[in-house]
Image: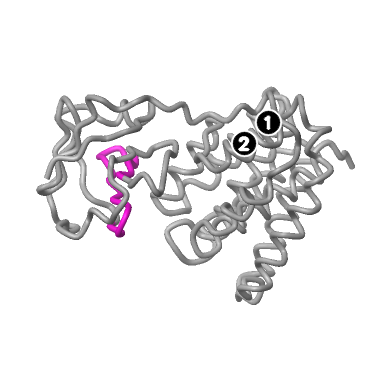
Amino acid sequence: MIVKSQIITPAVQAWLVPGRTARILHLFDQVCNLVNEDGEVLSLVTAAIGPGPFHLVLGVTRPFTHTLTLAAPVTVQANGVQVGTLVVDISSAACWQPQVAWAGLQAHRAQWQPVVPTIQQMMQQYRARLNLDTAVMQPELENGLARLLAGVRRRHTAGVQEGSARLAGLGPGLTPAGDDILLGVIYGLWATCPQSVAQPLVQVMVDTAVPYTTTLSAAWLQAAARGEAGMVWHELGHRFMVNGHDWEEIVAQILQTGHSSGADALWGFTAVCLTSGQRP
């Protein structure tokens, strides 16, 4: 089966080097995660999943992985990639830039900062409805985030390392809850701090966390360190910058990402947005 891709990213272009060794990492109905010999992830996804930092968006809307197995061979070609009997053609794919307009968000912060407590309340209500706060590791998540935020406020490398280490890989799943919180904190730092302040803090977080988490979660954290995020976060930023309104449906979409990934990311994002700029 030949499928044309609609959207490609710079990271995917760099991944698709003919002759590289790769294998299937995970298979889901609408996602096929590949990993190469350097541990870098490429995700084949349907249009329904949409663009992400390392997503190759296919021109299909329905599940496409039913003919694949984890043992299916992966071959990187000059014009795409073949996975088992699935051939993905990138020749007509449009390049999407995954870096969010963080500078614009910083410039318009006075416009959207007042709604952050409401977003935090939405997140808390969602977590309560799904009983997410009853997890055994909940106190560890709260403690790790508190330690991390304290380090961020002080611009204290050791404190940021400690908080990140406590959260890294904490919880079950392909992207553990602790990592999702870290992801949200990174987005919050990019949205509220100048690059000169955010970059070193973010790099410490990612360098600390990556060795202790899953391959997929590490890929998301490393993309976040470059200022990259999925389309839904781009849309949230856009609505914040346009008028500071009409963000509710986007927040609802983020909350519905994964079982708790979106809610955990918003937990970290809102927490750092509400504390960024505070000094001890």
For the N terminus, the image quarter is top left
Q: Is residue 30 magenta?
A: yes
Q: Magenta residues, as a range?
A: 27-44
Residue 90 in the image: above or below residue 85:
above
Q: Residues within 10 Å of mark 1 (few under 14, many from 20)?
A: many
Q: x%, y% of residue 83?
A: 16, 45
| Residue 195 position in % (x across, y down) | 67, 24
* In contact (CB < 8 Å): disc 1 and disc 2: yes
Tag of residue 202: 2
The residue under the point 14% across, 40% down is: 2
83 left or right, relative to 212: left
Q: In terms of depth relative to the viewer, which is nearer, 70 or 107?
A: 107
- The residue located at (51%, 65%) in the rendering is 259
Image quadrant for the C terminus? top right
Residue highlighted by disc 1: 198
* Depicted 214 relative to depicted 207: above or below: below
Neighbourhood count class around disc 2 (C-alpha, 10 Å): few under 14, some 14–19, many 20 upward: many
The image's mark for residue 91 is none
Identify the residue at horizontal 14%, vertical 38% (top origin). 75
Identify which residue, 271 or 245, lies in the foreground.
245
The image quadrant of residue 160 is: top right
Q: Position of residue 257 (x, y in %)?
A: 52, 56
Q: Amino acid at mark 2?
A: Val
Which element carries disc 2, helix, strand or loop?
helix
Q: Is residue 146 left or right of residue 201?
A: right
Total marks shown come to 2
Quadrant assignment, res 278: top right
Between residue 165 and residue 138, name the one nearer to us: 138
Q: Is residue 202 above or below residue 139?
A: above
Tell me which secondary structure the magenta stretch mostly adopts.
strand
Residue 161 falls inside the magenta stretch: no
Residue type (three-letter) at the residue carrying disc 1: Ala
